[in-house]
Image (cartoon, grey):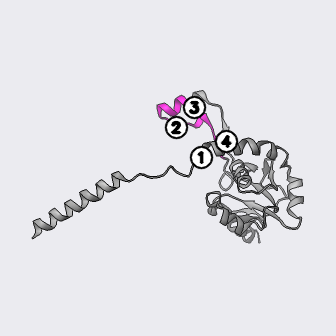
C-alpha cells in the first residue's frame, strides 16, 4: 500500500511539473519604450517647475495644495515636512494616487532625501559614488569608468505623477540644511527631540 501511495505521489508530481513547464505566460507589463517616451515628454515640463525653498513654502500655504512625500513609510514616519501627505513611491497606482490627491488639477509639491543635508540618517543622499564601489572586480572596473551619479527619488516621482495624468507638479530644487528655521518638520523623531528640549 505504501508503495502504491509513493508511486501515485511521484506520478502526480511529474504531471504537475510537466504542466508547469508547458505554461506560457504573457509578456510582463513593463515597457521601456513607454518610459523613454514619457521621460522625453516630462523633461521640458519639469524644467519650468523646479522651485526654490521660499517659493515651495509659499505655494505650500495656498489652498488645495499637497506637499507629497514619496519616501518609505519608515522614513516618513520618522521625519517629514509638516503637513506633507504620504504615499511611498513603491505604492504608486492609479487608485492609491486618487485616494491621496483629490484631482488631476491639484497642485503637488515634491521633495526627497536629496533636497536636505545635515541628517545623513533620515535624509541620506541617493547617489552612486564610484570611490565607494564594492571590492568585487566588476564593481572596481565600473567604479574606475564612472563619475558620481545622483539617483534622487524626485525624478521617478515626477515622471510617474506626470504619467498618471498629474500636470501641476512642482519640485524643490535646492539643497537645504535640515536646521533651516524656515522649515517645520514633524514625525516621531521630531516629537522626541521636542520633549527632550523641554
Label 3: how many Cα within 10 Å (few below 14, some 14–19, many 20+): some
Residue 184 in the figure: left or right of residue 20: right
Return the x and y of residue 89 as percentages of the image width and height: 65, 57
**In the rendering, which numbered label is found on residue 134?**
2
Residue under the image location 66 percent in, 35 percent down: 148
- For marks 2 and 1, the one nearer the N-term is 1
- Toward which corner of the image does residue 54 lie, by quadrant? bottom right
Q: Viewer-nearest of labels 2 and 1? A: 1
Q: Which residue lies under the disc numbered 3?
A: 143
Return the x and y of residue 58 as percentages of the image width and height: 90, 59
Indicate the secondary structure of the residue bearing disc 2.
loop
Q: Are marks 1 and 3 in contact (CB under 8 Å)?
A: no
Indicate the secondary structure of the residue bearing disc 1.
loop
Residue under the image location 52 percent in, 37 percent down: 134
Q: Viewer-nearest of labels 4 and 2? A: 4
Q: Which residue lies under the disc numbered 4?
A: 36
Q: Which residue lies under the disc numbered 1?
A: 31
Q: Is residue 132 magenta?
A: yes
Q: Viewer-nearest of labels 1 and 3? A: 1
Tell me which segment is drawn in magenta: 126-142
- For marks 1 and 3, the one nearer the N-term is 1
Could you give the CA–CA distance between mark 3 and mark 2, rounded to whole angstroms?
9 Å
Could you give the CA–CA distance between mark 1 and mark 3, rounded to whole angstroms?
29 Å
- For marks 4 and 2, the one nearer the N-term is 4
Could you give the CA–CA distance between mark 2 and mark 1, rounded to whole angstroms?
30 Å
Q: Are marks 4 and 2 in contact (CB under 8 Å)?
A: no
- For marks 1 and 4, the one nearer the N-term is 1
**In the rendering, which numbered label is found on residue 43?**
none
Amino acid at each position: 500500500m505504501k508503495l502504491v501511495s509513493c508511486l501515485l505521489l511521484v506520478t502526480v508530481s511529474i504531471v504537475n511539473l510537466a504542466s508547469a513547464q508547458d505554461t506560457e505566460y504573457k509578456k510582463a507589463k513593463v515597457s521601456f519604450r513607454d518610459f523613454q517616451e514619457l521621460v522625453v515628454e516630462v523633461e521640458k515640463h519639469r524644467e519650468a517647475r523646479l522651485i526654490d525653498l521660499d517659493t515651495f513654502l509659499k505655494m505650500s500655504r495656498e489652498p488645495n495644495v499637497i506637499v507629497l512625500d514619496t519616501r518609505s513609510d519608515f522614513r516618513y514616519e520618522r521625519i517629514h515636512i509638516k503637513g506633507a501627505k504620504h504615499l511611498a513611491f513603491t505604492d504608486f497606482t492609479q487608485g492609491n494616487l486618487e485616494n491621496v490627491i483629490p484631482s488631476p488639477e491639484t497642485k503637488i509639491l515634491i521633495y526627497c532625501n536629496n533636497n536636505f543635508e545635515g541628517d545623513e540618517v533620515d535624509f541620506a543622499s541617493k547617489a552612486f559614488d564610484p570611490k565607494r564601489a564594492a571590492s568585487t572586480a566588476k564593481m572596481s572596473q565600473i567604479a574606475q569608468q564612472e563619475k558620481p551619479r545622483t539617483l534622487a527619488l524626485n525624478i521617478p516621482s515626477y515622471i510617474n505623477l506626470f504619467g498618471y495624468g498629474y500636470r501641476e507638479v512642482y519640485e524643490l530644487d535646492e539643497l537645504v540644511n535640515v536646521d533651516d528655521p524656515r522649515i517645520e518638520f514633524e514625525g516621531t523623531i521630531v516629537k522626541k527631540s521636542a520633549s527632550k528640549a523641554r
